[in-house]
Image (spheres, coloured by chain):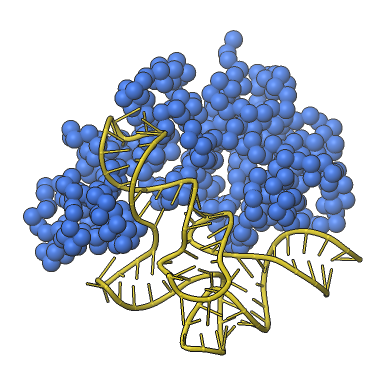
Amino acid sequence: MTKNVFDTLNERGFVAQVTDEDALRQQFSNETVIFYTGYDSTANSLHVGNLVTVMAMMHLQQAGHRPIGLIGGGTTMIGDPSGKTEMRQMLTRELIEANGRSIQAQLNHYLKFDADQAITINNAEWLLELNYVTFLREIGRHFSVNRMLAAEAYKQRLERGLSFIEFNYQILQAYDYLELFRRYGCTLQLGGDDQWGNLLAGVDLIRRLEGKTVQAMTYPLLTTSSGAKMGKTADGAVWLDPNKFSPYDYYQYWINCDDRDVEKLLKIFTFLPMDEIKRLSALEGAEIREAKRVLAYEATVITHGEAEAQAAEAGAQAAFSHKGGDVDSMPTTTVSRSRLADGLGVLEIFAEVGLTKSRSDARRMLQQGGIYVNDNRVDDVSAELTAEDDTDEGILLRAGKKKYHRLVFE
RNA sequence: GGAGGGAUGCCCGAGUGGCUAAAGGGGGCUGACUGUAAAUCAGCUGGCUAUGCCUACGGCGGUUCGAAUCCGUCUCCCUCCA
């Protein structure tokens, strides 16, 4: 007997809450389950936080079930207040549409779409056309304001203020589920644990209108062991789009994770078998670096492909382990040789390639001993790079301990 | 519609005419220690053609030698009343 995919998800840490675990197991073993996850079109790329559901969808698809990636082109016009402290900025319709297209393209990269194995669809398709009064009469009457107000997700907002537009979000999301149930026979919705209330609203609506019981399942909201939200760096989200967040940085993001998170991350963000994960996360001390290396590599392969992952790994080796590696894979900027001849200010070039935010930032960092050229600390604010600094591999710039950038000249 | 309260740097939050590039905290960054980890300690945390200059306390305009601080006006938010 093959393993139930529910167990796979569960042992890998994808499950926070489920409506009816037994029923869901049954479905998974007896039929092809059509399930969906929604993605807001608030940005033109998904980020690591969204990747959890994407990975869950991949597991389920592998087990023979059929995912629907729902692009929230309609719901993003409203803005989900769940768990937020403040109202979201309203985005223009054009922006939402463009974002939706980018996200759709990204999902195509993770899921298999041939032979109707998966679907992506935009809820703008049905939401934007709705007639207000008709909608209220058919759908709105099934929602109890009393119950909605009691929900945990709105708690903070009831203290700070919640506008009517946002209050409608849950109803629209519930309606999405209904629509997908009617169109495709979708019987499972996945989402983050903060979505639990929204998911239940959909389950409820389908029960009332269709007399059918459908399922909902949430994954735990990931935080790092140090308490921060998963997928955030100083400069913002960890995007999956290589143009917004390079594969090199993506690899660095994973390899720099907290020791305590390694096992959790391996389970969710790689497809390695559980016993391999157990072996890796049992490593201790400096050894655990091996586990992080594997994590970074595997995660980068899934999002950016093998070639990019190898390049990122080679770049990391060149920078961090002084035994070879491939400097070509490091972030590199090409500069005209004439600038070098004129004397290229160290502060200027650090700011220019983005190792520091500004020249002032570079100056500060230099004064604190965090600016290196070819692995030698620079302590003179007015230092300049000259042809003398150039090597066969260009000039290696470093800000702090971990951020490298290579200059080559032409 | 009426009455009141509010908008400060990445976030929270002090400041109510000059000593304010703006207390304090969080976050972030750098250094030391390490393992590209955590914890800890120290420093830094608007920009620039840099012992000075420019920009900044919701927007615009005004008072003043001088405004985040006072006045007018606009925008947005909150609370109570209808």
Depth check, front residue: A206 or B46: B46
How many marks are shown on the rendered structure?
A: 0
Looking at the image, residue A132 sits to the left or right of residue B53; the answer is: right
Q: Residue at the location (84% across, 44% down)? A: A146
Above/below status of A260 relative to B73: above
Looking at the image, residue B31 sits to the left or right of residue A19; the answer is: left
Above/below status of A247 relative to B13: above
Locate residue A210: give its quadrant.
top right
Residue A183 locus on image (x, y percent): 73, 40
Quarter of the image with the N terminus of chain A in it: top right
Q: Residue at the location (63% across, 60% down)? A: A90
Tint applied to chain B in the drawing: yellow
User: Which residue appears farthest toward the top when viewing the image?
Assistant: A1
Quarter of the image with the C terminus of chain A in it: bottom left
User: Which residue appears farthest toward the left when viewing the image?
Assistant: A388
Looking at the image, residue A61 sits to the left or right of residue A328; the answer is: right
Residue A296 locus on image (x, y percent): 38, 33
Above/below status of A262 relative to A401: above
Depth check, front residue: A113 or A241: A241
Locate residue A270: give its quadrant.
top left
Residue A119 locus on image (x, y percent): 60, 40
Can residue A98 be seen here? yes
Residue A13 locus on image (x, y percent): 55, 25
The chain painted blue is A
Q: Residue at the location (65% across, 44% down)? A: A83
Can residue A61 be seen here? no
Q: Residue at the location (52% across, 40% down)? A: A229
